[in-house]
């Protein structure tokens, strides 16, 4: 299998953590890819018109999009337990992950607004609104002991990627002081090899 990825992408990190936990990382060829707003990448666009990371190309040549769908595919392949099979726990995990993905989307948009959009065209209120979505999302998980203290699953993996991306791109945002339970959770998660290995490079 081949996984398009960037070491800076929290979405690709999510899949890498899952692949390590499931014992599949050695079966996956990591293929670096570069995507950026306003920058053409015709080769990658032929793989996915959305031009988003990551993408998994299976041994049969099938293209699987979206980090959650890729993790679900790998989890099924390995007979893992990163995503509950059925019942209330499954829908809770999927809902948590939807919130996490939305938080990551908002953080990425804040990054683009600050670093990519030309000076004089930046919309501060829009950026503030998106940052508030991520920030209040952290506040919600701060008060979710079932996630912070539960089994290692897609919710914990996604939350690790949110906090890691906050450190990577928004180092001065103060999330650790604001959310001490998330800080304790993150420190505990860094003891896992899959989480430690996949930490983004220094910005």
Image: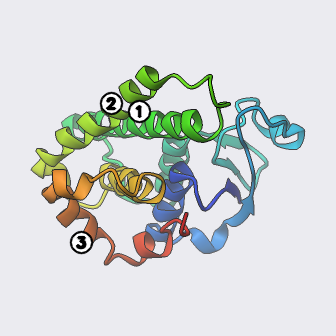
Q: Earlier in the sequence, mark 3 or mark 1?
A: 1
- 89 or 54: which is nearer to us? 54
> Mark 1 sits on what residue?
102
Task: Give how far apart the Cα atoms at labels 3 and 1 are.
Answer: 24 Å
Q: Is residue 143 left or right of residue 83?
A: left
Q: Earlier in the sequence, mark 1 or mark 2?
A: 1
Residue visible at 75% across and 50% down in the picture: 34
Q: Position of residue 111 (x, y in %)?
A: 53, 41
Q: Is residue 42 left or right of residue 81?
A: right
- 182 or 189: which is nearer to us? 182
> Crowding at label 2, few (<14), some or many (≥20) Cα neighbours within 10 Å?
some
| Circle 1/circle 2 CB separation < 8 Å | yes
As helix, strand or loop, the secondary structure at mark 1 comes to helix
Q: Earlier in the sequence, mark 2 or mark 3?
A: 2
Q: Position of residue 87 (x, y in %)?
A: 23, 36
Relative vertical location of residue 173 with respect to residue 203 in this rendering, above or below: above
| Circle 3/circle 1 CB separation < 8 Å | no
Relative vertical location of residue 11 with respect to residue 32 in this rendering, above or below: above
Q: Position of residue 75 (x, y in %)?
A: 46, 55
Q: Is residue 130 left or right of residue 189?
A: right
> Mark 2 sits on what residue?
133
Q: Is residue 192 left or right of residue 146?
A: right
């Amino acid at each position: 299998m081949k996984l398009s990825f960037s070491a800076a992408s929290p979405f690709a990190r999510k899949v890498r953590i899952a692949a390590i936990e499931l014992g599949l990382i050695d079966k996956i060829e990591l293929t670096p890819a570069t995507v950026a707003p306003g920058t053409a990448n015709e080769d990658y666009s032929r793989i996915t018109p959305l031009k988003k990371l990551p993408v998994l190309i299976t041994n049969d040549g099938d293209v699987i999009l979206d980090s959650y769908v890729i993790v679900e595919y790998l989890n099924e392949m390995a007979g893992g337990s990163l995503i509950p099979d059925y019942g209330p726990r499954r829908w809770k995990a999927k809902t948590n992950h939807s919130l996490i993905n939305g938080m990551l989307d908002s953080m990425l948009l804040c990054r683009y607004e600050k670093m990519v959009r030309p000076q004089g065209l930046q919309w501060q209120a829009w950026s503030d609104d998106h940052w508030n979505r991520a920030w209040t999302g952290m506040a919600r998980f701060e008060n979710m002991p079932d996630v912070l203290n539960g089994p290692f699953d897609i919710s914990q993996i996604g939350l690790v990627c949110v906090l890691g991306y906050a450190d990577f791109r928004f180092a001065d945002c103060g999330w650790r002081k604001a959310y001490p339970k998330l800080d304790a959770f993150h420190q505990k998660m860094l003891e896992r090899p899959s989480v430690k290995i996949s930490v983004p490079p220094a910005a």
